[in-house]
């Protein structure tokens, strides 16, 4: 969900139409300081929910909408995105300011919200090639600090005590994404995915912790300061909930294994040559910030994370086949689903083989 001025964001032609007159009238009535005329273009990012740049004579905004057409139950809940960002506004987790929320389908045909546009940089490549090698580690440390800060928050204290259910996070998430995968018959089945779906419920580790989790914490879902290694806004909270923080962190650390042509990842690269922390050092920095002594069951968390992303891409495949995918790159994402399912299975097999503790990376 891009929001800054970086040229790589790809805002351009509108692919999912918006009722411009109705939107302009709503903005005039609901967003303080709004001035006509209004110009609209659509970002290429935002795989699930159409995202637009709104330009006016005195300000720019971002519009985030629930997609039109047939969608799976519970998906694309933009109202949850707005709720969590509003709750985090006064915390140390950087988020855009929410300016207006609308659940009246008579306006645009679906739920939507408007937020401030944050100027800065988005990095689509996890190796941060635009940054000098000697400075890249500081950008990784900024990501590490923000996700640890979020996981250290007390959800009740920030007004998110009812944002999700406490306990049994893996059981519920595995059930949710498995059901969504199995229900989408149009998108089809995959042998590797079927194996992981069958195994995951049998391998859930003991112990539980409930925190706010982002659900898609990647470098390309953040706006960085124009010249400093500092995050100005964390974006795309559609998958956020209350859940297990180690699942969220493993999903983020999945970048060390992710092929870069699928989403921002370092798969196959040597982080030391790139000037980046190793996976072991990155894990160590996180659990030091969290006050943890170590992370067991690491490959379970990694298998779960690849499974979950594979399920998301499977959903994108279904939307492509139904003709209501909002992103210009949705077809490429859909095609990557089998590779993600295979990566999930490989992590599952490492877990089954007993290579399962993060501390092993640190020895």
Image (cartoon, rainbow, N blue to C red):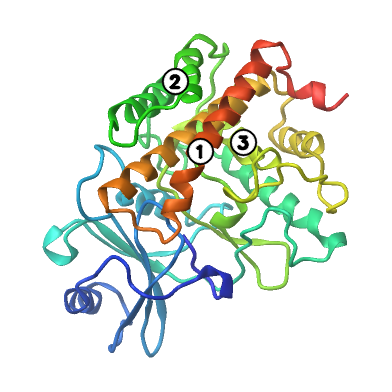
Check the picture and name the quadrant holding the C terminus. top right
Q: Which numbered disc, 3 or 1, marks the residue that appears first in the sequence?
A: 1
Label 1 sits on residue: 213
Q: Residue drawn at (38%, 45%), measured in percent from left and top?
A: 316
Would residue 224 be found to the left or right of residue 44 on screen? right
Please report the residue visible at 43 percent of the width from the left and 68 percent of the height from the top. 43
Q: Secondary structure at mark 2?
A: helix
**Distance CA(mark 3)–CA(mark 1):** 9 Å
Q: Position of residue 59 (x, y in %)?
A: 41, 83
- Is label 2 in contact with label 1 (beta carbons under 8 Å)? no
Label 2, label 3: how many angstroms apart (C-alpha)?
Answer: 24 Å
Residue 270 in the image: above or below residue 208: below
Task: Decide which of tag 2 and tag 3 comes sooner along the chain.
Answer: 2
Q: Residue at 58% across / 49% down in the picture?
A: 263
> Crowdedness of circle 3 by 10 Å Cα count: few (<14), some, many (20+)?
many
- Residue 234, given in percent of the width and then of the height, sits at 54, 55
Q: Which mark is residue 249?
A: 3
Circle 3 SS class: helix
Distance of label 2 from label 1 (alpha carbons): 26 Å
Q: Percent from the top left, x then y, of residue 126? A: 68, 53
Specify whether 355 is left or right of 79: right
Residue bearing mark 2: 194
Residue 64, compared with residue 269, is above or below; it is below
Q: Furthest residue to the left? A: 106
């Amino acid at each position: 969900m891009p929001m800054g001025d970086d040229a790589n964001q790809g805002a351009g032609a509108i692919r999912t139409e918006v009722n411009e007159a109705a939107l302009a009238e709503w903005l005039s009535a609901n967003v303080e300081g709004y001035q006509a005329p209004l110009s609209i273009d659509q970002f290429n990012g935002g795989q699930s929910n159409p995202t637009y740049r709104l330009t006016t004579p005195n300000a720019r905004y971002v519009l985030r909408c629930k997609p039109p057409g047939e969608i799976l139950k519970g998906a694309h809940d933009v109202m949850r995105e707005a709720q969590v960002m509003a709750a985090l506004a006064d915390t140390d987790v950087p988020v855009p300011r929410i300016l207006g929320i609308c659940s009246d389908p008579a306006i645009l045909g679906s739920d939507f919200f408007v937020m401030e546009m944050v100027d800065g940089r988005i990095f689509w490549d996890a190796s941060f090639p635009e940054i000098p090698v000697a400075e890249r580690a500081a950008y990784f440390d900024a990501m590490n600090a923000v996700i640890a800060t979020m996981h250290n928050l007390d959800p009740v204290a920030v007004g998110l005590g009812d944002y999700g259910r406490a306990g049994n996070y893996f059981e519920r998430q595995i059930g949710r994404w498995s059901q969504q995968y199995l229900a989408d018959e149009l998108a089809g089945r995959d042998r590797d995915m079927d194996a992981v779906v069958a195994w995951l419920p049998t391998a859930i580790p003991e112990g539980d912790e409930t925190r706010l989790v982002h659900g898609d914490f990647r470098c390309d879902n953040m706006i960085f300061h124009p010249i400093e290694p500092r995050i100005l806004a964390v974006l795309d909270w559609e998958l956020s909930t209350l859940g297990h923080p180690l699942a969220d962190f493993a999903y983020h650390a999945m970048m060390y294994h992710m092929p870069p042509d699928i989403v921002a990842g370092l798969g196959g690269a040597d982080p030391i040559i790139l000037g980046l922390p190793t996976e072991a050092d990155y894990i160590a920095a996180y659990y030091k910030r969290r006050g943890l002594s170590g992370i067991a069951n690491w490959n379970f968390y990694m298998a779960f994370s690849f499974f979950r992303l594979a399920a998301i891409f499977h959903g994108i495949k279904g939307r492509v086949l139904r003709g209501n995918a909002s992103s210009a790159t949705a077809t490429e994402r859909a095609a990557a689903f089998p590779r993600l399912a295979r990566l999930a299975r490989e992590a599952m097999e490492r877990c089954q083989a007993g290579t399962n503790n993060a501390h092993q990376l640190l020895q």
